[in-house]
Image (tube, helix red, strand yellow):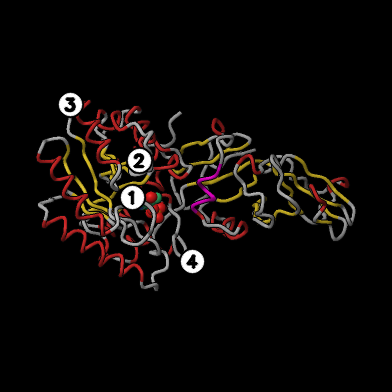
């Protein structure tokens, strides 16, 4: 294979230097990450930006993404689990860092020791305080109120007493209430009324906290869709995940229309190419049969790599054409029908040709959105579920001119 010279132009397909070329890879464009941070920071300003890097940065790789996001102006990092936050600290990342999803088995002491901010919905408070006593260091706490999502967060009924207890512990020097936050349920559907209701409930919770003497550094509510569509939800800090990765949270609005650039490209090479007769069954169940003499291309990615098994019909780009996957997606492989190429009679074989599942969508290339549609899911799930069997490869690690680091 030949590789076009790197142009430094993010709009062109990601350039893969031969040293990085692998049978399968998820290429992560860190310049796209930096661009998206700058874009979201401009939209959110004067609010600060928390880069949400939970779930290994939605499959993109938490440590490289966190570093790129911080270098481009993100002020905070966010994860679901304390264990994810500890991994970032272990990599030497010292930025303010919040983890918000805990169990009684979470390691609160390690979080306090590592200076990780801890989201607190209620039951965690006594464990956080015990950890602060043990570590002889005040915990940094963000109190979470449930304004309607119905997951964690204190109900408005319980909010008053949670705030009161937290302030008692703050007065004892055991913790500091650094933040107050909540999470939105339907911000990706801007026409729905519930975001207004949640915003009103959040303001009520803030007023109660203020009356109790809380003076938080950061009040935060907005996720990516709210950051992009609801300036009135920005407060002091926005928590952006999906937008950081260059994906659109809105049906019918492309990343490009939002000024975002998809950062992940999943690619492989065609592993087999052969002519078959009409009526050839394809893959387990023989659910697809060729309509005439045809040529099949074998794509060596399957559900073990994170391609949803249900997503037959999802596009694979080979030679500038998007072919739908035909037949069942198997653990390791799936098939495209290229039409009659007559390889056996000297026609062009696509064996070894690059096959792109999704990327930034330039030049009509397939997108994570296309795969989400084929799988009946959202783009969050498509990128996040790409499995560890697909190595992540980073391009544009250094800002402009630096090029990939070997
Ligand atoms: C995942 C998550 C986010 C980020 O949501 P996006 O829609 O990806 O921006 C923000 N806040 C909380 C609490 C989350 O769990």
Residue 147 location (% of width, % of height): 31, 61
Gap between marks 1 and 4 measured at Cα: 21 Å
Q: Secondary structure at mark 2?
A: helix
Q: Earlier in the sequence, mark 4 or mark 2?
A: 2
Gap between marks 1 and 3 measured at Cα: 36 Å
Q: Nearer the viewer, residue 162 or 6?
A: 162
Tell me whether circle 1 and circle 4 mark residues in contact (CB < 8 Å): no
Gap between marks 4 and 2 measured at Cα: 28 Å
What label sits on residue 251 in the rendered view? 4
Left or right: 135 with respect to 305?
left
Q: Nearer the viewer, mark 4 or mark 2?
A: 4
Residue 104 location (% of width, % of height): 36, 36
What label sits on residue 37 in the rendered view? 1
What label sits on residue 392 in the rendered view? none
* Image quarter of the N terminus: top right
Q: Nearer the viewer, mark 4 or mark 3?
A: 3
Q: Is residue 380 something one can see in this rendering?
A: yes
The answer to whether residue 361 is above or below residue 14 is below
Tell me whether circle 1 and circle 3 mark residues in contact (CB < 8 Å): no
Q: Secondary structure at mark 3?
A: loop
Residue 386 location (% of width, % of height): 55, 43
Task: Give the residue pinned by disc 2.
Answer: 68
Q: Earlier in the sequence, mark 2 or mark 1?
A: 1
Residue 400, by quadrant, is top left
Which residues lie in the magenta part? 380-386
Task: Give the residue pinned by disc 3.
Answer: 136
Q: Is residue 244 something one can see in this rendering?
A: no
Q: Earlier in the sequence, mark 4 or mark 3?
A: 3
Q: Earlier in the sequence, mark 2 or mark 3?
A: 2
């Amino acid at each position: 294979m030949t590789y076009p010279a790197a142009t430094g132009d993010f709009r062109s397909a990601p350039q893969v230097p031969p040293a990085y070329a692998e049978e399968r890879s998820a290429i992560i464009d860190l310049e796209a990450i930096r661009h998206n941070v700058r874009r979201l920071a401009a939209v959110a300003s004067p609010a600060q930006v928390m880069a949400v890097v939970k779930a290994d940065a939605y499959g993109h790789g938490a440590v490289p993404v966190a570093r790129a996001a911080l270098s481009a102006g993100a002020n905070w990092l966010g994860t679901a689990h304390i264990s994810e936050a500890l991994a970032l600290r272990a990599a030497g990342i010292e930025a303010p860092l919040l983890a918000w999803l805990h169990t009684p088995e979470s390691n609160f002491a390690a979080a306090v020791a590592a200076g990780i901010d801890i989201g607190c919905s209620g039951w965690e408070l006594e464990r956080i305080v015990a950890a602060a006593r043990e570590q002889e260091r005040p915990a940094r706490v963000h109190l979470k109120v449930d304004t309607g999502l119905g997951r964690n967060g204190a109900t408005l009924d319980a909010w008053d007493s949670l705030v009161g207890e937290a302030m008692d512990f703050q007065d004892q020097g055991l913790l500091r209430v650094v933040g107050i936050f909540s999470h939105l349920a339907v911000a990706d559907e801007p026409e729905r009324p519930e975001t207004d209701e949640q915003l009103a409930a959040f303001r009520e919770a803030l007023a109660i906290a203020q009356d109790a003497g809380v003076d938080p550094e950061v009040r935060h509510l907005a996720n990516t869709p709210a950051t992009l569509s609801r300036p009135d939800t920005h407060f002091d800090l926005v928590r952006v995940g999906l937008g950081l990765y260059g994906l659109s949270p809105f049906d019918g609005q492309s990343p490009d229309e939002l000024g975002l650039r998809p950062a992940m490209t999943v690619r492989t090479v065609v592993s087999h190419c052969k002519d078959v007769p009409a009526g050839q069954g394809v893959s387990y169940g023989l659910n697809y049969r060729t309509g005439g003499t045809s040529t099949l291309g074998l794509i060596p990615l399957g559900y073990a790599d994170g391609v949803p098994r249900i997503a037959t019909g999802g596009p694979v780009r080979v030679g500038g054409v998007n072919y739908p996957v035909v037949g069942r997606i198997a653990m390791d492989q799936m098939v495209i029908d290229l039409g009659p190429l007559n390889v056996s009679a000297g026609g062009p074989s696509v064996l070894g040709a690059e096959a792109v599942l999704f990327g930034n969508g330039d030049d009509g290339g397939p997108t994570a959105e296309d795969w989400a549609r084929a799988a009946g899911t959202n783009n969050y799930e498509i990128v996040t579920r790409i499995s560890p069997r697909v190595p992540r490869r980073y391009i544009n690690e250094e800002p402009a001119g630096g090029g990939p680091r070997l």
